[in-house]
């Protein structure tokens, strides 16, 4: 029995097998248990002798069992360490981290310039009431800008539009805050334009509004010069050309000196320049002095305060800054374009 038991212990390959050997040789139904039971029928001397033999067997069994268990245990541990081995020298799997869209970073850059000048950021809804997008901005219901070929209306609602300009947020600001106010309004706007290289039915604006006592056109010019220089280069000149917007009077379109053909350095524009076509100037935004009608419609007193407003097209600035030739590139979600910036 002892030889069988020791052989079985030596043969056990796994801890589970070893346990089974223990039950088989020393458990309740084992030969050992049978022998123990039969001790009752022996003489005291016989009992004593058998008892000694059984104890010796148990000791030897236990010693062999413990030794084997330790062997198997450390083998199992070694195997586990081997199979769970981590190779810390492997290069990590490449993650493709997200990044801000070019329009987002240019919008942020523009906003930062004005925040640096003391403006606050104001935001409003893209689905907007005609009142904020048009009426309060001196653009009455019969104005051509409100025609369906220019403006996207929300079906089934009365005079609800996708905002055509973030000027709507300026109207919201003036109707809810007393002057002085200085806000920039970044965001998406929508127009019923068909798509080509320079038009998109959705685009991005940063508009600005300053209303306070004695704000003049000179303040507007200085502000826009600071903006142009921050974005396009420290020595750039700007010029204001007379223009028209319903909500400003006078109104201007603002050009920055072309930096692509050297006109910014005081030279004449290069007739072959693909950006300014030789004029030496690039149009970058619309602006003007807030029309007194707009101030009164929004509850301000035009005899007490005056102001200026401007509207910057973010796509246009991004195209000029980064040499993007087609506005559709911003909206095509082509990863090659997106990861380039
Ligand atoms: N809202 C005008 C536009 O979208 C831009 C603008 C803003 C012009 C403010 C003048 C003053 O075209």
Image (cartoon, rainbow, N blue to C red):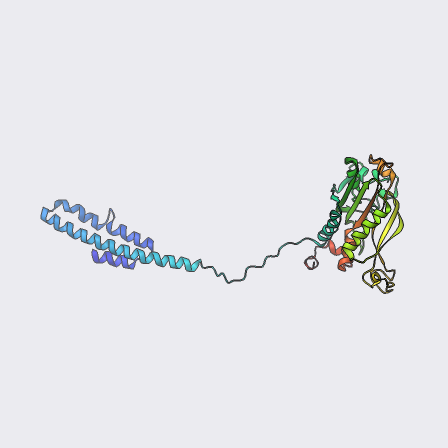
Q: In this view, does 64 lie above or below 187?
A: below
Residue 2 in which image quadrant: bottom left
| Residue 325 vs residue 294, the one in the foreground | 294
Q: Nearer the viewer, residue 144 or 37?
A: 144
Whole-percent x, y for residue 199 in the image: 80, 53
Identify the residue at image location x=82%, y=47%. Answer: 310
Q: Position of residue 89 (x, y in %)?
A: 50, 63
Quadrant location of the N terminus in the rendered image: bottom left
Q: In this view, does 222 lie above or below 213?
A: below
Give whichever of 123, 46 is nearer the camera: 123
Q: Residue 76, can we see it?
A: yes
Q: Position of residue 6 (x, y in %)?
A: 24, 57
Name the residue at 62% across, 55% down.
97
The reply to whether residue 43 is visible in this rendering is no
Q: How many labels does the image show?
A: 0
Image quadrant containing the C terminus? bottom right
Q: Image point 77% across, 48% down: which residue?
A: 205
At 76% from the left edge and 55% from the top edge, which residue is drawn?
318
Q: Residue 23: percent from the left, percent from the top?
A: 27, 50
Judging depth in this view, the residue of 269 and 52 nearest the camera is: 269
């Amino acid at each position: 029995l002892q030889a069988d038991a020791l052989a079985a212990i030596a043969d056990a390959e796994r801890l589970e097998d070893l346990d089974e050997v223990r039950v088989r040789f020393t458990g309740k139904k084992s030969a050992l248990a049978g022998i123990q039971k039969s001790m009752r029928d022996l003489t005291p001397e016989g009992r004593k002798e058998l008892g000694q033999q059984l104890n010796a067997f148990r000791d030897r069994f236990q010693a062999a069992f413990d030794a084997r268990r330790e062997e198997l245990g450390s083998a199992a541990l070694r195997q586990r360490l081997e199979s769970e081995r981590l190779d810390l020298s492997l290069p990590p799997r490449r993650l493709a981290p997200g990044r801000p869209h070019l329009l987002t970073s240019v919008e942020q850059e523009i906003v930062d310039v004005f925040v640096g000048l003391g403006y606050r950021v104001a935001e409003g809804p893209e689905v907007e009431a005609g009142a904020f997008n048009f009426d309060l901005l001196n653009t009455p219901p019969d104005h051509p800008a409100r025609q369906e070929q220019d403006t996207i209306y929300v079906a089934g609602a009365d005079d609800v539009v996708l905002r055509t300009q973030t000027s709507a947020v300026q109207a919201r600001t003036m109707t809810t805050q007393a002057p002085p106010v200085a806000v920039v309004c970044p965001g998406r706007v929508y127009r019923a334009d068909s798509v080509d290289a320079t038009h998109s039915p959705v685009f991005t604006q940063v508009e600005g509004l300053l209303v306070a006592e004695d704000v003049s056109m000179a303040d507007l010019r200085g502000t826009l010069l600071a903006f142009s220089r921050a974005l396009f280069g420290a020595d750039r000149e700007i010029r204001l050309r007379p223009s028209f917007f319903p909500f400003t009077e006078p109104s201007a379109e603002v050009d920055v000196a072309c930096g692509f053909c050297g006109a910014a350095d005081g030279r004449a524009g290069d007739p072959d320049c693909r950006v300014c076509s030789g004029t030496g100037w690039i149009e970058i935004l619309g602006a003007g002095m807030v029309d007194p009608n707009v101030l009164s419609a929004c509850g301000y007193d035009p005899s007490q305060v005056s102001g200026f407003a401007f509207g910057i097209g973010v796509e246009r600035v991004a195209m000029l800054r980064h040499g993007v030739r087609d506005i559709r590139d911003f909206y095509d979600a082509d990863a090659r374009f997106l990861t380039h910036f």
